[in-house]
Amino acid sequence: MSNHYQILIIGGGNAGISVASQLLHKRSNLNIGIVDPSDKHYYQPAWTLVGAGIFDIKKTVRNEKEVIPKNTTWIKEAVATFHPTGNKVICNSGKEITYEYLIVCPGIQLDWNKIKGLKETLGKNNVSSNYDFNSAPYTWEMIKNFKGGMAVFTNPSTPIKCGGAPHKIMYLAVDYWRKKGVLEQCDVHYVSGSNAIFGVPEYKATLEKVIEKGNIKVHYNANTVAINGQNKTIEFETTATPSAIKESLSKSNAACYSINETTDANVNKSNTVTLNFDLCHAVPPQSAPDFIKNSPLRDATNPLGYVEIDKNTMQHIRFSNVFALGDCTNAPCSKTGAAIRKQAPVVVTNLLEVMDKKIPTAYYDGYSACPIPTQYGKLMLAEFDYTNKPQMTFPFDQAKPRWTMWILKTKILPWLYWNKILKGTA
């Protein structure tokens, strides 16, 4: 196997495979290597549906070798570091791979250990996460067997892939409990590091109505720091005052929570809240993979270590023969498959133009989409750009949840992914 490639792609997920396929559609003679250590390829957007009991987890996974485009070379290695000044990548095995052009798209890293106790209790003790292939089916077991009590859904303070996923499963759970007649016995809490349920006003208004209808108690700017599965407690830090915290918990049993107020004047004003729970769906903080954080490709001003690119051309700021896309970049867009679908052709066009000694002309405007089910059978398709302005594809108000959008999410998009997007034709 050659150790030199005309184009080297880091990552064999949605971004890496779709970009490789599109490049070969443009120029079939390109010499492309794809570096990825995984045996499996996952369609992760369906894991919320798995957690809601309406999608088979087995249909979300295929062997990686089945999706690697023909006429490319799969290098089954994990990257250790980059040497962009020498056009070289070093793998964990010690193998060195050189390139003429580099595309970086290994996805995002799930930092499970940043919530104390989460990794140890995941998939048991009524603690689950749809961000984990093995745990998503357990989410459904928890939801369908829940007869009432304290249900907590968390969202970290860092950017995450599929930013709507932490609350999508909450809306479906509430709808299920309502239909089963147990919602009156459920005390539902959303603990979020964000300052609002959604960043686009038109879609935010819809979701706030869903929250009100479900009697969901929200805690914004609240960062989950620990989960104890055996004791059934979750701890989160918040800058909210004790009185505001108590007001947000006013309809809950006072025995279900406690507040530890900060008294040290040298510590930033924050309070730690401990909530008891009977069911907990947790989402870990996320960041760039460590091998990017510790490389020259990272944005030195970004504490999460994302690749430093021009947000419109997807070209690296300092290394002109390097491009990046997907969840690993510092582009200020939502980290979704829909964003990748718009970024991929921009990378392909601009890379080929750079190879031809031309100035990149393709432009990514920050488009992203988040399909948010608000109940079983209805979904709001939120589409927007860098400016948080709606970019609606269909000729109707997409801020209104619809059955047609539910069909798009549950039937059309999974088929489109496996049959068109990965093959570079959509």
Image: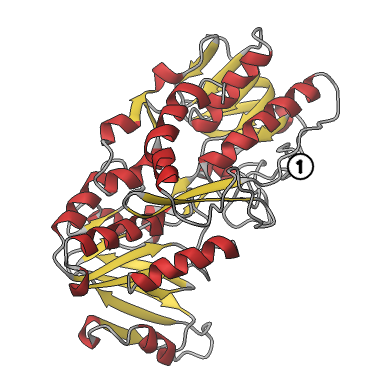
Q: Give the amino acid type for the residue marked by disc 1 in the picture.
A: Ile
Is residue 244 shown left or right of residue 203?
left
Mark 1 neighbour class, 10 Å CA radius: few under 14, some 14 to 19, many 20 or more: some
User: Is residue 5 something one can see in this rendering?
Assistant: no
> In this rendering, is residue 364 above or below 185?
above
Which residue is painted at 38% across and 80% down in the image?
Answer: 272
User: What's the residue at 52%, 65% (across, down)?
Assistant: 204
Q: Position of residue 131 (x, y in %)?
A: 36, 47
Residue that badge 1 annotates: 317
Judging depth in this view, the residue of 253 and 316 nearest the camera is 253
Could you say where residue 69 lies in the image, as x and y percent from the top left? Answer: 51, 15
Q: Is residue 148 left or right of residue 329?
A: left
Residue at the location (46% across, 73% down)?
Answer: 220
Above-or-below relation of 245 to 137: below
Q: Is residue 53 left or right of residue 305?
A: left
Coordinates of residue 130 in the picture (x, y in percent): 33, 49
Which image quarter holds the C terminus? top right
From this viewpoint, which residue is outermost toward the front? Answer: 396
Residue 154, picture quadrant: bottom left
Number of marks in the image? 1
Most extreme residue toward the right, as rendered?
358
Q: Nearer the viewer, residue 11 or 180?
A: 180
* 66 with respect to 151 (left or right): right
